[in-house]
Amino acid sequence: MSTNTSVFSSTSFFQSDLWLFTIYMFATYEIVFWLCNGFLIYIEMFDIPSIDQYRIQKHKKKIRFQPDMVHLMIKRTIYHQMSLVFLGPILYYIFNYVCHVDIQGPRPPWSTILFQIGLFIVIQDTIFFWSHYLLHTPWLYKNIHKKHHVYKQPTGVTAILDDPIEGIINQIAVWFTLVLLKETHIFTLCLWVAIKLYQIVMAHSGYNFPYITTQYWLPDLMPGALAHDYHHQHSNSNYGSFFSIWDQLMGTHRLSTSKKQIN
Ligand SMILES: [Zn+2]
Ligand SMILES: [Zn+2]
């Protein structure tokens, strides 16, 4: 259950739900983000043939040979990291307005956690597909989504580099499920942050890795980096997030062509 949150005493502030929520969410985000991107930056900097064989856009030079692009990515990643400081407290108040987030109570049973994670995935995938589809209409593309598409050769950090309005739309897709839930737990939310972040960073990795990616196990249902890398190159297909279901229904699934690209 939630504790009383007094801001007048520093001891109680550091035990408050607001503080613990912000720290848990921020720590989960930073650990997953920098573990994945640390690895991707390392293999960008050093040529390792056994790993480079999995690069999707092998016909292009690595990004480290494009100084303007590297400079833009570093600048925007710093801005994004700074914005996260404000995001935690804002999300805390929004989440507790639409749903109760249990911070200090015992972890719920795994059946509850997995059910809620499943809902998060399905609802995020649906809202993301349709909002992304609309962001590719001419006006929205030119004024908002183009900022994310300057990266024709995506890499991990580009997953979160976009226009602030698109950032808000994506956050709504990620968290909309909370409107349907009466109660959730910080453990479930942190697990969802880790899963979602791993999914988008790997989709932008620029590599078709075996074993550690969804496309290795479920290439048609969850095409991951194969689909999203193709999306960054051509902009006219593969609008989905986790699954290819909406793309298959709308006739925008281009997996076979992207498979050819990597072979
Ligand atoms: Zn992207
Ligand atoms: Zn797009």
Image (spheres, rainbow, N blue to C red):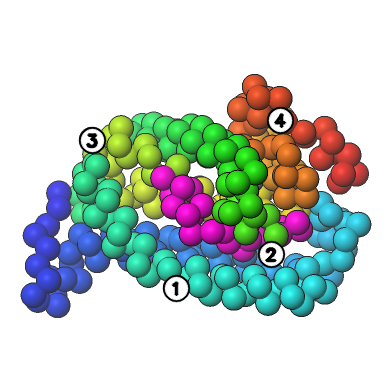
Residue at the (78%, 68%) spot, across then down: 63
Type of the residue with mark 3 = Lys
Judge whether 146 appears above or below 211 on screen: below
| Residue 252: mark | 4
Which residues, given as a range, are shown in magenta? 151-172
Question: Where residue 220 sits in the image (x, y, percent)?
Answer: 72, 30
Type of the residue with mark 1 = Met
Residue at the (64%, 22%) spot, across then down: 249
Q: Considering the image in quadrants, where does the C terminus appear?
A: top right
Element at badge 3? loop
Check if mark 2's residue and mark 1's residue have beta carbons within 8 Å.
no
Check if mark 3's residue and mark 2's residue have beta carbons within 8 Å.
no
Asked if residue 156 lies left or right of residue 178, the reply is right
Type of the residue with mark 4 = Thr
Q: Is mark 3 within 8 Å of ligand 1?
A: no
* Residue behind mark 1: 82
Residue at the (66%, 66%) spot, across then down: 39
| Residue 40: mark | 2
Question: Where residue 13 sits in the image (x, y, percent)?
Answer: 16, 71
Query: What whole-number distance in Å separates the C-alpha atoms at marks 3 and 2?
Result: 38 Å
Query: What whole-number distance in Å separates the C-alpha atoms at marks 2 and 1?
Result: 21 Å
Type of the residue with mark 2 = Leu
Q: Is mark 2 within 8 Å of ligand 1?
A: no
Please identify, in this view, whether the residue under mark 1 or under mark 3 is nearer the observer: 1
In this view, the residue farthest toward the top is 249
Q: Residues within 10 Å of mark 1 (few under 14, many from 20)?
A: few
Quarter of the rendering containing residue 260: top right
